[in-house]
Amino acid sequence: MTLDDTWAGERAARWLRQAAGLERQMAPVSDVLFAAAALRPGEQVLDVGCGTGPTTRQAAAAVGPDGRVTGIDVSPDLLEAAAATGAPVDWVLADVTTWSPPAGAYDVVLSRFGVMFFDDPHTAFAHLAEATRPGGRLAIAVWGARTESPLFTVPLQAALGVLAARGIPEPDGLSPHEGPFSLHDPAATARLLDEAGWTDVRSAEHLLPLPFGGGLDPAAAAELAADFGPTRLAVEPLDAVGRTAALAAMTSAFADHVDERGHVLLDGFVRVVTARRS
């Protein structure tokens, strides 16, 4: 992940369009992440890949007026939206891989799905270790493999079925172990962190029921899936007729996973990884 247009333009615009609903979707993840981070009043916290800043603001509330929180991200568009909230937070536009951090400045490094896209993970996590005081803490939420989360597999398999019926090959970029799922392997993640200057690495597994898009009916959830996440890549090769068929297939698949209000509810497999600065 570098400071280019990767997280600007239309990609950032899609995220901003869905930010409120996605935050409601991810609230259960924040619950387990912040329980593991155990932030205390007065601590200095770095939130990595902070996006529009929901977890950054939550961290600021946890550490109180005697603490301080910094949110770091590569997207100028998302940071602009974060800064517009007026929260008592320092916002930093930087790529952690090439960042020169202040040595030992932070008690805690925190991230909710913000550390899986590093171009050079070892260097990035080494920089984060350098920025953390000895004995300081790391708490990050990462996805398991894509195939372990119905949140991803239910809409994606429906869309891929439409592609197959039309003789369209599966597009590139849908590896269950890359991109947002690159830290799915707890043993490999532990080795990576150990080599980057962290110790006492632990991984806690959580299968969390997540309200798709924050609480959407099956048809609305299908529209979101077509616009966001891995399923968007599957829908892109389709013409208008094929897209309509994919939306219908996803709507039907989602209809089997609704709560008492008729909102789509699907499990997401999340690992919360914790460690200490060596």
Image (cartoon, rainbow, N blue to C red):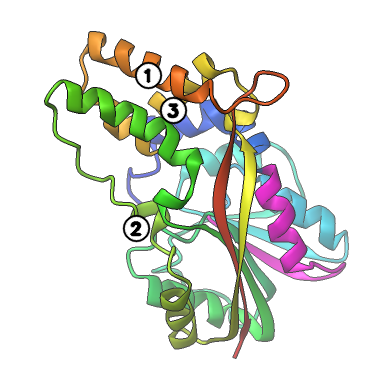
Residue 14 locus on image (x, y percent): 45, 29
Q: Which numbered disc covers residue 177?
A: 2
Q: Disc 3 and disc 2: Cα gap in Å?
A: 19 Å
- Judge whether 234 appears above or below 131 on screen: above
**Above or below, comparing residue 260 to residue 201 in the picture:** above
- Where is residue 87? Give x, y as percent: 75, 45
Q: Is residue 217 left or right of residue 222?
A: right
Residue tagged 1: 249
Three-letter code, disc 1: Ala
> Residues in magenta?
27-49
Q: For the point 40% across and 43% down, which residue is it?
A: 7
- On screen, residue 173 above or below 12: below
Which quadrant holds the C terminus? bottom right
> Could you tell which of marks 3 and 1 lies nearer the N-terminus?
3
Q: Earlier in the sequence, mark 1 or mark 2?
A: 2
Q: The disc labelled 3 sits on which kind of residue?
A: Ala
**Dot 3: what SS?**
helix
Q: Alpha-carbon neighbours of circle 2 within 10 Å: few (<14), some, or many (≥20)? A: some
Few, some or many C-alpha atoms within 10 Å of disc 3 (few <14, some 14-19, many ≥20)?
A: many
Instruction: Tell me the SS state at disc 2.
Output: loop
Viewer-nearest residue: 134 or 224: 224
Q: Are marks 3 and 2 in contact (CB under 8 Å)?
A: no
Residue shown at the point (79%, 71%) measured from the top left: 43
User: Which residue is identified by label 3?
Assistant: 225
Task: Say whether marks 3 and 1 touch (CB < 8 Å).
Answer: no
Q: From what the image shows, is residue 130 above or below residue 254?
A: below
Residue displayed at 60% across by 77% down: 202
Q: Is residue 179 magenta?
A: no
**Would you identify the image quadrant in which residue 72 lies?**
bottom right
